Amino acid sequence: MISFAVSIVAAFTGYLLQTNFDSQWIAFEAKDALNAVGIGAWFNVANLGQIFMWHIVLLPLAVGVIVALHVILIRAKGVVPPIDAAETDAQLVDSRGGSQ
Ligand code: HEM
């Protein structure tokens, strides 16, 4: 879910790279939105160079790191069991009279 959310932001920055009237419009709507939530000082969506680097380096890197972490966690901890599996498995183990 986090990777999905970050990739949505990456896609938004992609729309700013079209260098046409669409991207100008989106940039100035986004500028108002970011200023309204108080983080406008950190990102200048009207600055093509800045947004280009966010798009081709930082955000894809963030998506890559999240995916790598996800795969490592799955390999280390295994997949999540079905919701009622723990209880059923415990009963199975009890009925066999041992740990397996
Ligand atoms: C999480 C990964 C990425 C997502 C979700 C993503 C998404 C997008 C989207 C939605 C656009 C707008 C396309 C359009 O409407 O014209 C775009 C444009 C663009 N992206 Fe990406 N992108 C990603 C990674 C990258 C990377 C790694 C690069 C380059 C190394 C890149 C380079 C570009 C360029 C140059 C454009 C402008 C193309 C144009 O408008 O003609 N993107 N991207």
Image (cartoon, rainbow, N blue to C red):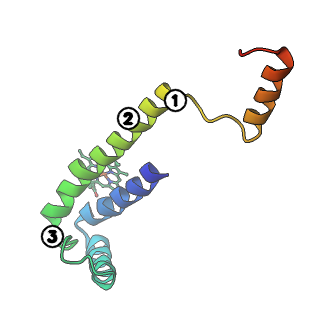
Q: Distance between the Cα atoms at labels 3 and 2?
A: 30 Å
- The nearer-to-camera label among 1 and 2 is 1
Q: Quadrant of residue 70?
A: top left
Is residue 24 or residue 54 the one in the foreground?
54
Going by the numbered disc 3, the residue's amino acid type is Asn
Is residue 50 or residue 80 the one in the foreground?
80
Above or below for 37 versus 17? below
Query: Is ligand 1 less than 8 Å from the beta carbon at label 1?
Result: no
The single residue placed furthest to the right in the displayed view is: 95
Is residue 75 or residue 21 the one in the foreground?
75
Q: Residue at x 50, y 31 (%)?
A: 74
Residue named by callout 2 = 68
Q: Earlier in the sequence, mark 1 or mark 2?
A: 2
Label 3: element kind = loop
Label 1: element kind = helix
Tags 1 and 2 touching, CB below 8 Å: no
Residue named by callout 1 = 77
Q: Tell how many labels.
A: 3
Above or below for 2 versus 25? above
Going by the numbered disc 2, the residue's amino acid type is Ala
Residue 47, which numbered label?
Answer: 3
Q: Quadrant of residue 5?
A: bottom left
Question: How many other residues sit within 10 Å of disc 2, few (<14), some (14-19) or many (≥20)?
Answer: few
Question: How many other residues sit within 10 Å of disc 3, few (<14), some (14-19) or many (≥20)?
Answer: few
Indicate the position of residue 2 as horizontal and vertical percent values: 44, 52
Q: Residue at x 80, y 31 (%)?
A: 88
